[in-house]
Image (cartoon, rainbow, N blue to C red):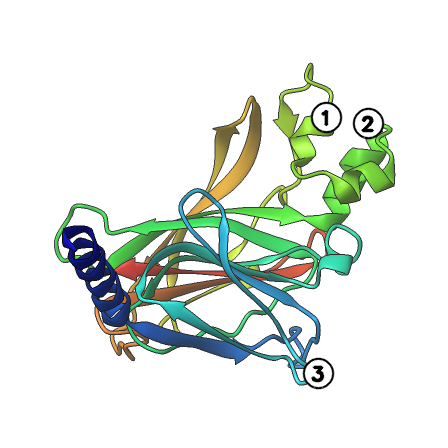
Amino acid sequence: MRKIILFGLVLMSSLSCMAQDKMYEIHGKVTNFNGVPIDSVTIRLMNNKFEAVYETLSNEDGDYLMNVKEGDYYCLYAIRLRDYRVRKLEYWNWNVPVHQNMTINPQYDRMEIYGINAFEPQVTPQETYMIYFRPMSLSKSLQLVSDQKIEKKSFEDAERTEELLDKSDKLINISPDSITQDELTIEINGMPSKIVGINKIREYARGFFMYGYCVQVLKPKQNNEALSGYDLISVTLNSAETGEIGKGEAFVRR
């Protein structure tokens, strides 16, 4: 009898915890940079172990919807899988705080804006953000694969490109050689942000070096709050060197 009562208490406690889990909606529309909807795009919400915890597909109108448990998620990414490394690269949105219903509208093409991080320099007034990101060009990636005589199918199927590369050459040079203010658009909560500095940075990761960029921007004087307590930073690069365009986003706690 005691075991039955104990089991009942544990079950009731579990059900109570489940009932307390808040669920919120992430929805949006996937388009190209001309506003044309993209169907059959896989959208995944990832945890900090880079595991997909929620996944859905966009419909013929580019619309998607996910009901997810409240929490802070590492990133959200979008790509039509059959296009990846063939015709397009990915869209990423970092540090996704799901504490209310959210709208995220992915856009992607052949330039991937990866690994966005942002912080406020320790100086008053706190009027700027330093934004780091790594742009990756599909055309330069394909050229690298060709130069190293890697089979195209192996490149398309590889989980990580660096696993296929010649380990004697420690540089993966797939970013634009330079970026100007005319090529780069930074928005904070949908408002244009003035760029005051662009610096190229050599980054180390998994045994190789790659190039990223650190951009300092002024915060817009008018701040249309995208999400309570957070700024949404959007980075769009239209590279004159490669003729490719890409976009990435990240949420930053204020």
- Which residue does the image show at 69% across and 75% down from the upper left? 38
Which sits earlier in the primary sequence, circle 1 or circle 2?
Answer: 2
Which of the two discs, 1 and 3, labels the residue nearer the N terminus? 3
- Label 2: which secondary element: loop
From this view, report whether residue 70 is shown above or below residue 140. below
Give the CA distance from mark 2 to mark 3. Answer: 38 Å
Furthest-top residue in this view: 168
Residue 18, horizontal then vertical, whole percent: 28, 66
Marks 1/3: CA–CA distance: 37 Å
Instruction: Name the quadrant of the N terminus.
Output: bottom left
Mark 3, Cα crowd under 10 Å, few <14 / some 14-19 / many 20+, is few
Instruction: Bin the neighbour count of mark 1 within 10 Å (Cα to Cα): few under 14, some 14-19, many 20 and up.
Output: some
The disc at residue 148 is 2
The reply to whether callout 2 and callout 3 are in contact (CB within 8 Å) is no
Measured along the vertical axis of the image, is residue 222 above or below residue 176? below
Q: What amino acid is at disc 2? A: Gln
Tag of residue 154: none
Q: Which residue is mark 1?
A: 165
Amino acid type of the residue that numbered disc 1 sits on in the rendered structure: Leu
